[in-house]
Image: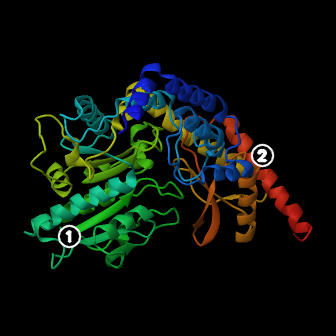
């Protein structure tokens, strides 16, 4: 590195001006984002062309770099932090989480080994214990802190694969999959796509899945589950991505335990219901499973990215994700690399710890329950508007809405998105096009719901006018 460049960067640290500049931009963003249009304007999206350039030959002033990001980047963000973003089950972020993440960013820790980050190691140990207590999971369970439930599902199924094959005297780490004993995969027909991704990556193949019929809410029908055995991975769901429904864990896990099958629960946003007194009936029996996957950045409203894998079988988990090297320094404390696929990862546990510490049990209970209450409000209010229909039972935070036919549903949704007063996406439910409303933001108020309902009404009225004009 040229000496003048190095000197310049040291000077930037000393004078702190660019950090003050970024902080000011951040404060301005937070002051406006909750009242701004939920989706970027066409002008803001068009202005992203300002980033289309060849890599500069020379250095650019840091001040100019931040100015460009703020001027053209900030307006092109989606207001997922706000109270009227209902797409893709994206949570907001609590202020304390943003502040802790900012502090953690400057620490720039990687908790792969205790010797790399004693604070990262300590916080992972503490949060692991808190999560086990909060969800009432077996005390011997271990936690890995990953980017999201996609990776958490992958880790869980890798641990399950290791344990089942090990029981068959097959070491997957040494022998690989070729000629390995067969591992059965059983799951419901409403399994999330990330489950299918994990199954593909791990070499099981989607054609090997034994699909189980589901009811009209997307729940596995227990009586339809095939006979299980000790070579089976049974995958259940805590929170259907469309309806929000939960499988009958109490019944199904008891059935799986008798067969000595491995049970994994995909609980990306729904597992948090287990932390709410009035909702924990939805997760009754989850403690009988072997592994669980959940996101912090959904229902708990941590900043992105924050996923968690929890596993009762610590040996299987660490063996499936194990790595070694002559340079590795193991300690008697927690070495985080044994619980995740990555070594090089940021200490996302910092903001997770901060939010759990800040909220406590009562705060988590209240925040998550409020999301459920807002979902019920949305369902009640939209149900009174002629031309809209709610197609699911509101058990948690998901609302499925449609119009009279697929064409009308698609056009009304397009109008809602263009109005930018709220934002949501589409899906297919029981063979029909639907609008999927996911309420998982601490910011969402009763007023936000009412404003969104009026946007739905405007969008429907606009479509009716266009239809009458033959548009």
**Is residue 266 left or right of 96 when viewed as pictured?**
left
Vertical side of 372 occupied by 209: above or below: below
For disc 2, the marked residue is 454
Residue that sits furthest to the left in the current view: 169
Q: Position of residue 465 (x, y in %)?
A: 89, 61
Tell me which label, 1 or 2, sits earlier in the chain: 1
- Identify the residue under disc 1: 229
- Vertical placement of residue 20 versus 151, above or below: above
Calculate the distance from the C-alpha at mark 1 to the C-alpha at mark 2. Answer: 52 Å
- Colour style of the rendered protein structure: rainbow
Q: Position of residue 39 (x, y in %)?
A: 67, 48
Nearer the observer, disc 1 or disc 2?
2
Q: Identify the residue shown where x is 27% and y is 50%.
A: 342
Left/right of residue 73 with respect to residue 312 in the rendered view = right
- Image-quadrant location for residue 433: bottom right
Q: Left or right: 272 with respect to 453?
A: left
Q: Nearer the viewer, residue 265 or 53?
A: 53
Query: Callout 2: few (<14), some (14-19), or many (20+) C-alpha neighbours within 10 Å?
Result: some
Q: Secondary structure at mark 2?
A: helix
Disc 1 + disc 2, Cβ < 8 Å: no
Q: Quadrant of the N terminus?
A: top left
Q: What is the secondary structure assignment of the residue under circle 1? A: loop
Q: Is residue 356 visible?
A: no
Viewer-side residue, 40 vs 276: 40
Q: Residue furthest right?
A: 469
Percent position of residue 88, x then y? 54, 53
Which residue: 70% across, 53% down? 46
The location of residue 393, given as percent across then percent down, is 56, 55
């Amino acid at each position: 590195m040229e000496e003048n460049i190095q000197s310049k960067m040291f000077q930037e640290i000393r004078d702190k001006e660019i950090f003050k500049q970024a902080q000011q931009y951040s404060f301005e963003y937070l002051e406006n984002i909750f009242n701004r249009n939920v989706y970027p304007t066409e002008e803001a999206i068009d202005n992203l062309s300002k980033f289309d350039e060849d890599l500069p030959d020379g250095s650019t002033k840091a001040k100019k770099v931040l100015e460009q990001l703020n001027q053209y980047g900030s307006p092109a963000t989606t207001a997922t932090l706000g109270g009227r973003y209902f797409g893709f089950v994206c949570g907001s972020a609590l202020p304390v989480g943003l502040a802790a993440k900012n502090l953690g960013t400057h620490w720039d820790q990687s908790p792969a080994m205790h010797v790399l980050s004693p604070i990262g190691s300590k916080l992972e140990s503490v949060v692991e214990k808190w999560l086990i207590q909060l969800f009432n999971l077996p005390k011997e369970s271990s936690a890995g802190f990953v980017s999201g439930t996609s990776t958490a599902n992958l880790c869980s199924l890798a641990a399950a694969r290791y344990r089942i094959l090990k029981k068959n005297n097959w070491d997957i780490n040494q022998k690989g999959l070729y000629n390995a004993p067969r591992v059965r995969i059983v799951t419901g027909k409403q399994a999330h796509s990330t489950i299918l991704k994990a199954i593909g990556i791990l070499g099981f193949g989607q054609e090997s899945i034994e699909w189980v019929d589901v009811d009209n809410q997307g729940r596995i029908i227990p009586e339809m589950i095939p006979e299980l055995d000790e070579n089976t991975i049974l995958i259940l769901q805590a929170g259907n991505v469309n309806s929000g429904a939960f499988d009958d864990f109490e019944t199904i896990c008891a059935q799986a335990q008798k067969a000595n099958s491995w049970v994994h629960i995909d609980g990306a946003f729904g597992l948090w219901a287990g932390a709410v007194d009035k909702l924990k009936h939805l997760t009754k029996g989850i403690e009988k499973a072997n592994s669980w996957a959940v996101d912090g950045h959904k229902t708990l409203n941590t900043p992105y990215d924050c996923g968690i894998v929890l596993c009762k079988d610590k040996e299987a988990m660490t063996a499936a994700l194990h790595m070694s090297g002559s340079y590795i320094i193991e300690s008697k404390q927690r070495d985080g690399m044994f619980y995740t696929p990555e070594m090089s990862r940021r200490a996302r546990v910092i903001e997770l710890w901060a939010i759990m510490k800040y909220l406590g049990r009562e705060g988590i209970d209240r925040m998550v329950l409020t999301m459920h209450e807002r979902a019920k409000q949305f369902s009640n209010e939209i149900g009174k508007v002629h031309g809209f229909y709610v197609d699911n039972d509101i058990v948690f935070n998901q609302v499925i809405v449609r119009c009279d036919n697929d064409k009308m549903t698609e056009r009304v949704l397009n109008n809602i998105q263009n109005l930018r007063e709220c934002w949501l996406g589409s899906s297919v439910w029981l063979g029909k096009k639907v609008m999927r409303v996911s309420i998982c933001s601490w910011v969402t108020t009763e007023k936000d719901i009412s404003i969104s309902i009026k946007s739905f009404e405007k969008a429907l009225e606009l479509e009716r006018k266009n239809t009458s004009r033959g548009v």
